[in-house]
């Protein structure tokens, strides 16, 4: 097939057996990567912005991977703008430590965390909503069964690349189906699910929504192991709790860990009710989990 001089830019939405599906303004091109990619350190992944050469109708060759804004390893995906952290009222109920950990990992990677409490038809999320709104994180209480409850949340997806996150059964796929016309993602009945991951897709895929954005219906992102540099994450942990930021300069010691020290600005804010107890508890738990990470463990 002859190569053309028609170069385009697009987003990789799917990668299967050596083919990359690159979306540009609503058209999806089936692409191969140019051979020399195999020798370079960068191999294209879902979410990558790429420059490609059209070789036939809707077929192309990827010439270049444009610089990445970020890259997560579980699942492998690049250039995420927002992580939509979904919890449900029951089956399973919210795990604040998991939520706070995901928020911190997001912030560390330059990703905006958005919190969604789904299945509002089953109970009251008032206390959870209060905690996260106070922490300054965009928080939505919704029901996938009630489209009217989704209007504000829908705006978060406008013009950006989002990844869904949260335990199996919380309603991630149901929400996307309710939010966007034409989405028909598989959803599962929790009570009949056989073990974990029954309904999770095997490969990561970005779906184009009708608001100029893309969304990945990903499981996972539940651990912080995807950080290439755990030591750096550990060193910056307090900065990743964005509700602590106004108080970090108030600490008496520059080496303050904000866990137990006298004269700690964060602990003072906690005592004054300016920081939520559960947020600080999660911070301390994460701090303890990361305590033994050393600088020589830089790369996984
Ligand atoms: N009552 C209620 N059930 C919901 C809601 N959203 C999802 N579900 C149900 O929860 C189960 C899991 O949903 P699913 O979208 O597959 O969750 P996922 O694993 O996070 O993608 C399915 O049986 C859905 O019908 C909701 O807002 N209210
Ligand atoms: Mg699902
Ligand atoms: Zn402190």
Image (spheres, grey):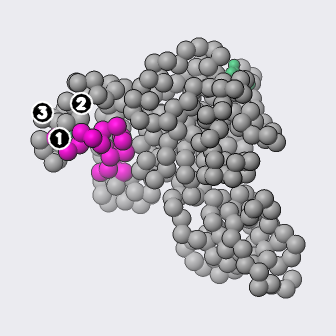
* CB within 8 Å, label 1 to label 2: yes
Taking the image as shown, residue 187 lies to the left or right of residue 129, namely right
Residue at x-position 62% and y-position 63%: 48
Q: CA distance from mark 3 to mark 1?
A: 11 Å
- Say which residue appears at 80% left-offset and 62% top-offset: 27
Is 59 left or right of 38, judged from the image as shown?
right
Callout 2: 10 Å neighbours few (<14), some, many (20+)?
some
> Which residues lie in the magenta part?
233-251
Identify residue for label 2: 269
Query: Which of the two residues, 284 or 131, is positioned nearer the viewer here?
Result: 131
| Cα–Cα span, label 1 and label 2 | 10 Å
Q: Residue at x 55, y 73 (%)?
A: 41
- In the displayed structure, 131 sits above or below 208; it is above
Q: Are marks 2 and 3 in contact (CB under 8 Å)?
A: no
> Label 3's element?
loop
Q: Which quadrant of the rendered structure holds the C terminus?
A: bottom left
Could you tell whether 231 is left or right of 3 in the image? left
Residue 211 visible to an observer of this rendering: yes
Residue 203 — which label? Answer: none
- Measure the alpha-carbon separation of dots 2 and 3: 13 Å
Q: Which mark is residue 262?
A: 3
- Residue wearing tag 1: 250
Q: Position of residue 115 (x, y in %)?
A: 52, 34
Question: Taken as a whole, is the magenta stretch helix, strand or loop?
Answer: helix
Across and down, in percent, residue 69 comes to 51, 61
Whether the residue carrying mark 1 lies under 8 Å from ligand 3 is answered with yes
**Residue, x 32% and y 60% (percent of image)?**
296
Q: Secondary structure at mark 1?
A: helix
Label 1 Cα crowd, 10 Å radius (few <14 / some 14-19 / many 20+): some
Q: Earlier in the sequence, mark 1 or mark 2?
A: 1
Decide if residue 251 is on the left or right side of residue 64.
left
Residue pushed farthest top?
Answer: 123
């Amino acid at each position: 097939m002859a190569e053309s001089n028609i170069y385009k830019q697009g987003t990789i939405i799917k990668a299967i057996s050596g083919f990359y599906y690159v979306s540009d303004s609503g058209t999806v091109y089936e692409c191969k990567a140019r051979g020399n990619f195999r020798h370079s350190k960068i191999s294209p992944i879902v979410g990558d912005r790429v420059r490609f050469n059209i070789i036939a109708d809707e077929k192309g060759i990827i010439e270049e991977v444009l610089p990445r804004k970020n890259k997560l390893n579980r699942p492998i995906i690049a250039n995420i703008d927002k992580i939509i952290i979904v919890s449900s009222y029951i089956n399973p109920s919210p795990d604040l430590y998991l939520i706070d950990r995901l928020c911190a990992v997001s912030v560390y990677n330059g990703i905006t965390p958005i919190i969604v409490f789904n299945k509002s038809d089953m109970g009251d999320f008032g206390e959870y909503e209060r905690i996260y709104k106070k922490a300054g994180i965009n928080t939505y209480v919704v029901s996938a069964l009630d489209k009217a409850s989704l209007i504000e949340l829908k705006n978060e997806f406008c013009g950006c690349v989002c990844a869904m996150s949260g335990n199996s059964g919380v309603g991630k796929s149901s929400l996307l189906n309710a939010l966007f016309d034409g989405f028909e993602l598989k959803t599962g009945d929790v009570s009949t699910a056989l073990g974990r991951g029954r309904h999770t897709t095997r490969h990561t895929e970005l779906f184009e929504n009708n608001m100029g954005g893309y969304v990945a219906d990903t499981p996972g992102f539940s651990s912080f192991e995807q950080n290439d540099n755990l030591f750096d994450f550990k060193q910056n942990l307090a900065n990743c709790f964005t509700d602590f930021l106004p108080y970090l300069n108030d600490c008496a010691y520059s080496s303050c860990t904000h866990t137990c020290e006298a004269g700690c600005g964060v602990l003072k804010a906690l005592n004054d009710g300016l920081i939520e107890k559960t947020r600080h508890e999660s911070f301390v738990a994460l701090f303890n989990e990361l305590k033994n990470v050393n600088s020589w463990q830089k790369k996984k």
